[in-house]
Amino acid sequence: MLSRTAAQLYWIGRYVERAEFTARLLEATLRLDALSARPAGQVAWASALLVTGADYGFAETKQQIVPQSVSSFLTLSPSNPSSIRSCLDSARSNAKSVRTALTRDAWEAINRAWLSLRGLATTGSYEETLALTAMIRAETRGFEGALARMLRNEAFHFIGLGAAIERADNTARLIDVKYHLLLPVGEEVGGVIDRDQWTTILHTVSANTAYRWLYHDELKPWLVADMLILRSEMPRSLAGATDEIVQHLAYIGKRLGRQGEADRLARRRQTTLSRTAIDSIFAEGLHEYLEGFVVENAQLDSAIAQQFKFG
Protein backbone atom coordinates (compact mmCIF):
# COMPACT_ATOMS: atom_id res chain seq x y z
CA MET A 1 0.00 0.00 0.00
CA LEU A 2 1.26 3.48 -0.88
CA SER A 3 2.09 5.72 2.06
CA ARG A 4 -0.18 8.45 0.68
CA THR A 5 -3.11 6.02 0.52
CA ALA A 6 -2.43 4.84 4.07
CA ALA A 7 -2.40 8.45 5.30
CA GLN A 8 -5.68 9.25 3.57
CA LEU A 9 -7.38 6.18 5.05
CA TYR A 10 -6.04 7.02 8.51
CA TRP A 11 -7.39 10.56 8.28
CA ILE A 12 -10.76 9.38 7.03
CA GLY A 13 -11.00 7.50 10.32
CA ARG A 14 -9.99 10.55 12.32
CA TYR A 15 -12.27 13.01 10.51
CA VAL A 16 -15.40 10.84 10.62
CA GLU A 17 -14.82 10.06 14.30
CA ARG A 18 -14.34 13.78 15.04
CA ALA A 19 -17.51 14.71 13.15
CA GLU A 20 -19.53 12.12 15.09
CA PHE A 21 -18.08 13.19 18.43
CA THR A 22 -18.82 16.87 17.73
CA ALA A 23 -22.41 15.98 16.78
CA ARG A 24 -22.78 14.00 20.02
CA LEU A 25 -21.27 16.84 22.05
CA LEU A 26 -23.53 19.40 20.39
CA GLU A 27 -26.66 17.34 21.04
CA ALA A 28 -25.70 16.78 24.68
CA THR A 29 -24.94 20.48 25.20
CA LEU A 30 -28.28 21.47 23.70
CA ARG A 31 -30.08 19.17 26.12
CA LEU A 32 -28.02 20.36 29.10
CA ASP A 33 -28.71 23.99 28.21
CA ALA A 34 -32.43 23.27 28.02
CA LEU A 35 -32.39 21.67 31.48
CA SER A 36 -30.05 24.06 33.27
CA ALA A 37 -30.25 27.53 34.72
CA ARG A 38 -28.80 30.16 32.40
CA PRO A 39 -25.30 30.39 34.00
CA ALA A 40 -24.81 26.63 33.71
CA GLY A 41 -25.98 26.74 30.11
CA GLN A 42 -23.46 29.45 29.23
CA VAL A 43 -20.61 27.53 30.79
CA ALA A 44 -21.73 24.36 29.00
CA TRP A 45 -21.45 26.10 25.61
CA ALA A 46 -18.02 27.48 26.50
CA SER A 47 -16.95 23.97 27.51
CA ALA A 48 -18.10 22.57 24.14
CA LEU A 49 -15.71 24.97 22.45
CA LEU A 50 -12.89 23.98 24.81
CA VAL A 51 -13.41 20.24 24.33
CA THR A 52 -13.19 20.58 20.55
CA GLY A 53 -10.24 22.97 20.71
CA ALA A 54 -12.32 25.66 18.99
CA ASP A 55 -12.29 28.26 21.77
CA TYR A 56 -9.56 30.48 20.27
CA GLY A 57 -11.04 30.31 16.79
CA PHE A 58 -14.47 31.22 18.11
CA ALA A 59 -13.06 34.14 20.11
CA GLU A 60 -11.67 35.57 16.88
CA THR A 61 -15.20 35.80 15.46
CA LYS A 62 -16.09 38.31 18.23
CA GLN A 63 -19.46 36.58 18.68
CA GLN A 64 -21.13 36.02 22.03
CA ILE A 65 -21.18 32.53 23.51
CA VAL A 66 -24.83 31.74 22.89
CA PRO A 67 -26.38 28.51 21.58
CA GLN A 68 -27.00 29.67 18.01
CA SER A 69 -23.54 31.10 17.37
CA VAL A 70 -21.66 28.20 18.99
CA SER A 71 -23.85 25.60 17.28
CA SER A 72 -23.18 27.14 13.87
CA PHE A 73 -19.44 27.45 14.56
CA LEU A 74 -19.14 23.82 15.65
CA THR A 75 -21.32 22.52 12.83
CA LEU A 76 -20.95 24.67 9.73
CA SER A 77 -18.06 27.13 10.00
CA PRO A 78 -15.46 26.66 7.23
CA SER A 79 -13.02 28.70 9.34
CA ASN A 80 -13.19 26.09 12.12
CA PRO A 81 -11.04 23.10 11.03
CA SER A 82 -12.83 20.91 13.60
CA SER A 83 -16.38 21.84 12.57
CA ILE A 84 -18.54 18.98 11.36
CA ARG A 85 -18.62 20.49 7.88
CA SER A 86 -14.83 20.86 7.75
CA CYS A 87 -14.35 17.28 8.98
CA LEU A 88 -16.77 15.86 6.42
CA ASP A 89 -15.23 17.97 3.65
CA SER A 90 -11.82 16.53 4.49
CA ALA A 91 -13.13 12.96 4.93
CA ARG A 92 -14.90 13.11 1.55
CA SER A 93 -11.86 14.58 -0.19
CA ASN A 94 -9.69 11.77 1.15
CA ALA A 95 -12.34 9.17 0.34
CA LYS A 96 -12.51 10.35 -3.29
CA SER A 97 -8.77 9.73 -3.58
CA VAL A 98 -9.00 6.18 -2.22
CA ARG A 99 -12.36 5.08 -3.67
CA THR A 100 -10.95 1.71 -4.74
CA ALA A 101 -9.95 0.95 -1.13
CA LEU A 102 -13.48 1.60 0.19
CA THR A 103 -16.71 -0.28 -0.30
CA ARG A 104 -19.55 1.46 -2.09
CA ASP A 105 -21.51 1.63 1.18
CA ALA A 106 -18.62 3.34 3.00
CA TRP A 107 -18.22 5.95 0.27
CA GLU A 108 -21.96 6.62 0.08
CA ALA A 109 -22.23 7.12 3.86
CA ILE A 110 -19.51 9.79 3.80
CA ASN A 111 -20.98 11.41 0.69
CA ARG A 112 -24.51 11.53 2.13
CA ALA A 113 -23.26 13.13 5.33
CA TRP A 114 -21.38 15.73 3.29
CA LEU A 115 -24.39 16.44 1.06
CA SER A 116 -26.64 16.94 4.10
CA LEU A 117 -24.68 20.04 5.12
CA ARG A 118 -24.17 21.50 1.66
CA GLY A 119 -25.96 24.82 1.31
CA LEU A 120 -26.81 25.20 5.00
CA ALA A 121 -26.01 28.65 6.38
CA THR A 122 -27.35 28.13 9.89
CA THR A 123 -28.25 25.23 12.15
CA GLY A 124 -31.71 26.71 12.75
CA SER A 125 -33.89 26.38 15.83
CA TYR A 126 -33.32 24.10 18.81
CA GLU A 127 -35.42 21.34 17.25
CA GLU A 128 -33.77 21.77 13.84
CA THR A 129 -30.28 21.59 15.35
CA LEU A 130 -31.18 18.42 17.26
CA ALA A 131 -32.53 16.91 14.05
CA LEU A 132 -29.34 17.86 12.22
CA THR A 133 -27.11 16.24 14.86
CA ALA A 134 -29.29 13.11 14.77
CA MET A 135 -28.91 12.92 11.00
CA ILE A 136 -25.12 13.32 11.18
CA ARG A 137 -24.88 10.64 13.84
CA ALA A 138 -27.01 8.31 11.70
CA GLU A 139 -24.74 8.81 8.70
CA THR A 140 -21.55 8.28 10.69
CA ARG A 141 -23.06 5.15 12.21
CA GLY A 142 -23.83 4.09 8.65
CA PHE A 143 -20.15 4.51 7.84
CA GLU A 144 -19.21 2.41 10.87
CA GLY A 145 -21.67 -0.25 9.72
CA ALA A 146 -20.14 -0.22 6.26
CA LEU A 147 -16.68 -0.66 7.77
CA ALA A 148 -17.91 -3.67 9.73
CA ARG A 149 -18.70 -5.34 6.41
CA MET A 150 -15.35 -4.47 4.82
CA LEU A 151 -12.59 -6.95 4.13
CA ARG A 152 -10.21 -7.00 7.13
CA ASN A 153 -7.25 -5.70 5.17
CA GLU A 154 -4.83 -2.79 5.55
CA ALA A 155 -7.48 -0.26 4.49
CA PHE A 156 -9.84 -1.38 7.24
CA HIS A 157 -7.11 -1.24 9.87
CA PHE A 158 -5.73 2.17 8.88
CA ILE A 159 -9.24 3.66 9.10
CA GLY A 160 -9.77 1.97 12.47
CA LEU A 161 -6.38 3.16 13.70
CA GLY A 162 -7.20 6.78 12.90
CA ALA A 163 -10.64 6.51 14.55
CA ALA A 164 -9.15 5.02 17.73
CA ILE A 165 -6.48 7.74 18.00
CA GLU A 166 -9.17 10.40 17.59
CA ARG A 167 -11.51 8.72 20.07
CA ALA A 168 -8.85 8.58 22.77
CA ASP A 169 -8.08 12.28 22.32
CA ASN A 170 -11.74 13.30 22.41
CA THR A 171 -12.53 11.32 25.57
CA ALA A 172 -9.50 12.66 27.45
CA ARG A 173 -10.40 16.26 26.60
CA LEU A 174 -14.04 15.71 27.55
CA ILE A 175 -13.19 14.37 31.02
CA ASP A 176 -10.62 17.11 31.63
CA VAL A 177 -12.99 19.95 30.79
CA LYS A 178 -15.72 18.56 33.05
CA TYR A 179 -13.47 18.06 36.05
CA HIS A 180 -11.71 21.39 35.89
CA LEU A 181 -13.76 23.92 33.99
CA LEU A 182 -17.42 23.07 33.67
CA LEU A 183 -19.08 23.53 37.08
CA PRO A 184 -20.04 27.21 37.58
CA VAL A 185 -18.40 29.07 40.47
CA GLY A 186 -20.48 28.77 43.63
CA GLU A 187 -22.35 25.67 42.48
CA GLU A 188 -22.33 22.62 44.72
CA VAL A 189 -20.32 19.55 43.76
CA GLY A 190 -22.89 16.76 43.65
CA GLY A 191 -25.73 19.26 43.23
CA VAL A 192 -28.36 19.32 40.48
CA ILE A 193 -26.17 21.11 37.94
CA ASP A 194 -23.22 18.83 38.64
CA ARG A 195 -25.37 15.71 38.18
CA ASP A 196 -26.89 17.10 34.97
CA GLN A 197 -23.41 17.74 33.62
CA TRP A 198 -22.17 14.24 34.44
CA THR A 199 -25.26 12.77 32.81
CA THR A 200 -24.44 14.89 29.75
CA ILE A 201 -20.89 13.53 29.68
CA LEU A 202 -22.20 9.97 29.73
CA HIS A 203 -24.73 10.80 27.02
CA THR A 204 -21.96 12.23 24.83
CA VAL A 205 -20.09 8.92 24.87
CA SER A 206 -23.25 6.75 24.88
CA ALA A 207 -22.40 5.34 28.29
CA ASN A 208 -25.46 5.88 30.51
CA THR A 209 -26.53 2.24 30.34
CA ALA A 210 -22.94 0.98 30.50
CA TYR A 211 -22.41 2.90 33.75
CA ARG A 212 -25.39 1.20 35.38
CA TRP A 213 -24.27 -2.23 34.19
CA LEU A 214 -20.72 -1.79 35.44
CA TYR A 215 -21.29 -0.11 38.80
CA HIS A 216 -24.91 -0.66 39.95
CA ASP A 217 -24.63 2.64 41.82
CA GLU A 218 -25.84 6.21 41.64
CA LEU A 219 -23.79 8.56 39.50
CA LYS A 220 -20.44 9.26 41.15
CA PRO A 221 -17.72 11.34 39.42
CA TRP A 222 -14.82 9.07 40.34
CA LEU A 223 -16.66 6.05 38.97
CA VAL A 224 -17.38 7.90 35.71
CA ALA A 225 -13.66 8.68 35.50
CA ASP A 226 -12.79 5.06 36.22
CA MET A 227 -15.09 3.87 33.44
CA LEU A 228 -13.93 6.39 30.84
CA ILE A 229 -10.23 5.98 31.60
CA LEU A 230 -9.53 2.42 32.77
CA ARG A 231 -12.39 0.10 31.77
CA SER A 232 -11.23 -1.52 28.54
CA GLU A 233 -14.67 -3.07 27.89
CA MET A 234 -15.95 0.49 27.33
CA PRO A 235 -15.10 1.24 23.65
CA ARG A 236 -14.79 5.00 24.15
CA SER A 237 -12.58 4.73 27.22
CA LEU A 238 -8.88 5.56 27.05
CA ALA A 239 -8.06 1.91 27.78
CA GLY A 240 -10.53 0.64 25.17
CA ALA A 241 -9.18 2.97 22.48
CA THR A 242 -5.60 2.01 23.37
CA ASP A 243 -6.39 -1.70 23.02
CA GLU A 244 -7.80 -0.99 19.55
CA ILE A 245 -4.71 0.98 18.56
CA VAL A 246 -2.42 -1.87 19.60
CA GLN A 247 -4.52 -4.38 17.64
CA HIS A 248 -4.61 -2.29 14.47
CA LEU A 249 -0.87 -1.59 14.60
CA ALA A 250 -0.12 -5.29 15.16
CA TYR A 251 -2.11 -6.31 12.09
CA ILE A 252 -0.66 -3.59 9.87
CA GLY A 253 2.87 -4.30 11.05
CA LYS A 254 2.47 -8.01 10.31
CA ARG A 255 1.04 -7.40 6.83
CA LEU A 256 3.47 -4.67 5.79
CA GLY A 257 6.47 -5.84 7.78
CA ARG A 258 6.79 -2.41 9.29
CA GLN A 259 6.88 -2.09 13.08
CA GLY A 260 8.61 0.52 15.18
CA GLU A 261 8.20 3.40 17.60
CA ALA A 262 4.42 3.62 17.23
CA ASP A 263 4.02 -0.01 18.31
CA ARG A 264 6.35 0.54 21.26
CA LEU A 265 4.49 3.65 22.45
CA ALA A 266 1.08 2.02 22.07
CA ARG A 267 2.05 -1.17 23.92
CA ARG A 268 3.71 0.84 26.69
CA ARG A 269 0.54 2.87 27.17
CA GLN A 270 -1.58 -0.29 27.16
CA THR A 271 0.60 -1.85 29.86
CA THR A 272 0.58 1.31 31.97
CA LEU A 273 -3.22 1.61 31.81
CA SER A 274 -3.68 -2.03 32.77
CA ARG A 275 -1.59 -1.46 35.92
CA THR A 276 -3.17 1.86 36.92
CA ALA A 277 -5.86 2.38 39.56
CA ILE A 278 -8.20 5.37 39.59
CA ASP A 279 -7.06 6.28 43.12
CA SER A 280 -3.49 6.73 41.92
CA ILE A 281 -4.67 8.96 39.07
CA PHE A 282 -6.51 11.24 41.48
CA ALA A 283 -3.53 11.25 43.85
CA GLU A 284 -1.25 12.34 41.02
CA GLY A 285 -3.78 14.91 39.80
CA LEU A 286 -6.46 14.12 37.23
CA HIS A 287 -5.81 17.22 35.15
CA GLU A 288 -2.10 16.48 34.99
CA TYR A 289 -2.80 12.86 34.07
CA LEU A 290 -5.19 13.77 31.25
CA GLU A 291 -2.95 16.55 29.99
CA GLY A 292 -0.09 14.06 29.82
CA PHE A 293 -2.31 11.56 28.00
CA VAL A 294 -3.25 14.10 25.32
CA VAL A 295 0.42 14.97 24.78
CA GLU A 296 1.30 11.26 24.61
CA ASN A 297 -1.52 10.69 22.12
CA ALA A 298 -0.12 13.42 19.88
CA GLN A 299 3.30 11.78 20.09
CA LEU A 300 1.76 8.46 19.10
CA ASP A 301 0.02 10.12 16.15
CA SER A 302 3.38 11.57 15.02
CA ALA A 303 5.08 8.19 15.46
CA ILE A 304 2.41 6.55 13.27
CA ALA A 305 2.96 9.18 10.56
CA GLN A 306 6.72 8.62 10.64
CA GLN A 307 6.54 4.84 10.81
CA PHE A 308 4.29 4.59 7.76
CA LYS A 309 5.87 7.56 5.97
CA PHE A 310 2.67 9.59 5.67
CA GLY A 311 4.64 12.64 4.56
Image: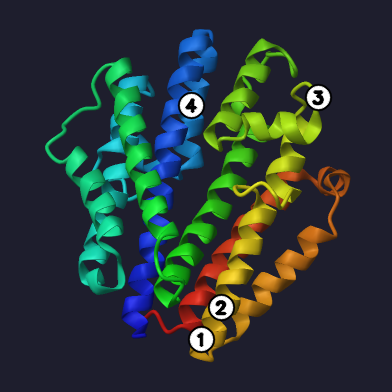
Q: Does label 1 or label 3 sit earlier along the sequence? A: 3
Amino acid identity at mark 3: Asp
Task: Tell me what residue is drawn at x 24 percent, y 73 percent.
Answer: 100
**Badge 4: few (under 14), some or many (20 or more) residues near its Cα, within 10 Å?**
many
* Inter-mark Cα distance, 2 to 3: 38 Å
Q: Quadrant of the C terminus?
A: bottom left
Foreground pick, 154 / 83? 154
Badge 1 element: helix
Residue behind mark 2: 251
Badge 3 element: loop
Residue behind mark 4: 28
Q: Does label 4 or label 2 sit earlier along the sequence? A: 4
Residue 255: mark in rendering = 1
Task: Tell me what residue is drawn at x 60 percent, y 60 percent.
Answer: 295
Where is residue 220 shown, x and y percent of the image?
77, 26
Q: Does label 4 or label 1 sit earlier along the sequence? A: 4
Residue 217: mark in rendering = 3
* Inter-mark Cα distance, 4 to 3: 22 Å
Q: Does label 2 or label 3 sit earlier along the sequence? A: 3
In this view, the residue farthest toward the bottom is 257
Where is residue 38 shown, x and y percent of the image?
49, 9
Residue 55 shows up from this direction: no
Colour convention of the picture:
rainbow
* Inter-mark Cα distance, 4 to 1: 40 Å
Q: Does label 4 or label 3 sit earlier along the sequence? A: 4
Where is residue 147 shown, x and y percent of the image?
40, 59
